[in-house]
């Protein structure tokens, strides 16, 4: 199902006249396994991160995503048809094993190391899973940064899926090749630093500006936007998680 879905997504992007710019396409490995690691600012990020790898090297990325998406009546069949990898957050080992198996078979596996969308639009803390998978499968890490996708559909803001002419930046960094001596924590730190530099450049070179004071929500606070600071965003995430846990514990009549 991957090719027709890619075709449909590209047609939708053309219909909206999205101004998609891909930088660093030459960094996508043409063959062999790789862990594609992307920042996370939008519900649509897997489409754009996957587009970067597909358009430049015709690589089909198998993304790791929470298993709820696979249980949905609409998204479930699509996710399974594209052979993405479901992750049960209460027991992530089966998903980890499936990802390593795919990497060893020469697949590109996509990972969002922040786990959830960043409300501040800055990088959150990274989990070490991507580095551990790359080490276990003996494949490189491919850093990818997206910017502009949050203007279409992100957490805590109404959807803007019909917004036209929106610039979207896809920046692909140089692969990070691991050695047997590398420790996952240190590799994750290197990865985050590389992606931080890419994100800073993507924000600096982004070709659009807010239309007015009310349109500054998609910019981080340090760039004059009204998005939450990383500290505020973390507090909001914790509150949302607590509310979700409370809902699960509430008995239903």
Image (spheres, rainbow, N blue to C red):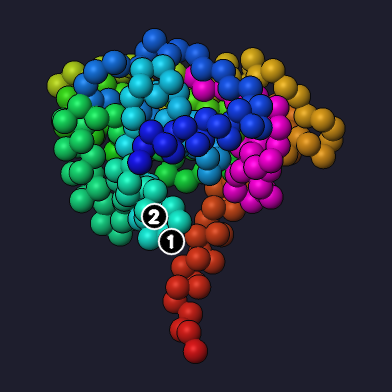
Image quadrant of residue 162?
top right
Residue at the bottom extreme of this rendering: 253
Image quadrant of residue 41?
top right
Q: x, y percentage for residue 202?
A: 58, 19
> Label 1: which residue?
73
Kindly indicate whether the residue at mark 1 contacts the one at mark 2 (C-beta within 8 angstroms). Answer: yes
Residue 166 part of the magenta-drawn span: yes
- Residue 248 shows in this picture: yes
Q: x, y percentage for residue 221?
A: 69, 34
The residue shown at (59%, 48%) is 155
- Residue 35 shows in this picture: no
Secondary element at tag 1: loop
Nearest the camera: 204 or 170? Answer: 170
Q: Main secondary structure of the magenta part?
A: loop
Instruction: State which quarter of the image contains the N terminus.
Output: top left
* Image side of residue 204 versus residue 216, left or right: left
Looking at the image, residue 5 lies above or below residue 169: below
Image quadrant of residue 53?
top left
- The local crowd at label 2, few if under 14, some if 14 to 19, many if 20 or more residues have their Cα within 10 Å, is some
> Label 2: which residue?
76
Residue 160 part of the magenta-drawn span: yes
The residue shown at (51%, 35%) is 9
């Amino acid at each position: 199902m991957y090719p027709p879905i890619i075709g449909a997504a590209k047609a939708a992007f053309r219909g909206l006249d999205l101004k998609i710019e891909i930088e660093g396409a030459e960094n996508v490995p043409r063959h062999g396994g790789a862990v594609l690691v992307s920042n996370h600012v939008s519900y649509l990020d897997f489409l754009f991160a996957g587009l970067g790898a597909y358009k430049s090297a015709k690589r089909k990325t198998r993304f790791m995503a929470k298993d709820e998406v696979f249980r949905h009546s609409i998204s479930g069949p699509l996710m399974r048809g594209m052979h993405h990898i479901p992750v049960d957050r209460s027991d992530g080992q089966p998903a980890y094993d499936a990802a390593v198996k795919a990497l060893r078979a020469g697949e590109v596996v996509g990972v969002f190391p922040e786990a959830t969308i960043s409300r501040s639009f800055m990088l959150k803390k990274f989990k070490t899973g991507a580095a551990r998978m790359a080490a276990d499968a003996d494949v490189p890490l491919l850093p990818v940064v997206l910017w502009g996708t949050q203007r279409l559909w992100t957490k805590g803001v109404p959807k803007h899926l019909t917004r036209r002419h929106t610039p979207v930046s896809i920046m692909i960094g140089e692969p990070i090749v691991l050695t047997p001596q590398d420790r996952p924590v240190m590799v994750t730190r290197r990865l985050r630093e590389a992606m931080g530099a890419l994100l800073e450049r993507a924000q600096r070179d982004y070709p659009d500006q807010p239309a007015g004071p009310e349109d500054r929500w998609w910019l981080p606070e340090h760039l004059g936007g009204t998005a939450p600071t990383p500290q505020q965003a973390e507090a909001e995430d914790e509150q949302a998680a607590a509310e979700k846990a409370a809902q699960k514990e509430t008995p239903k009549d």
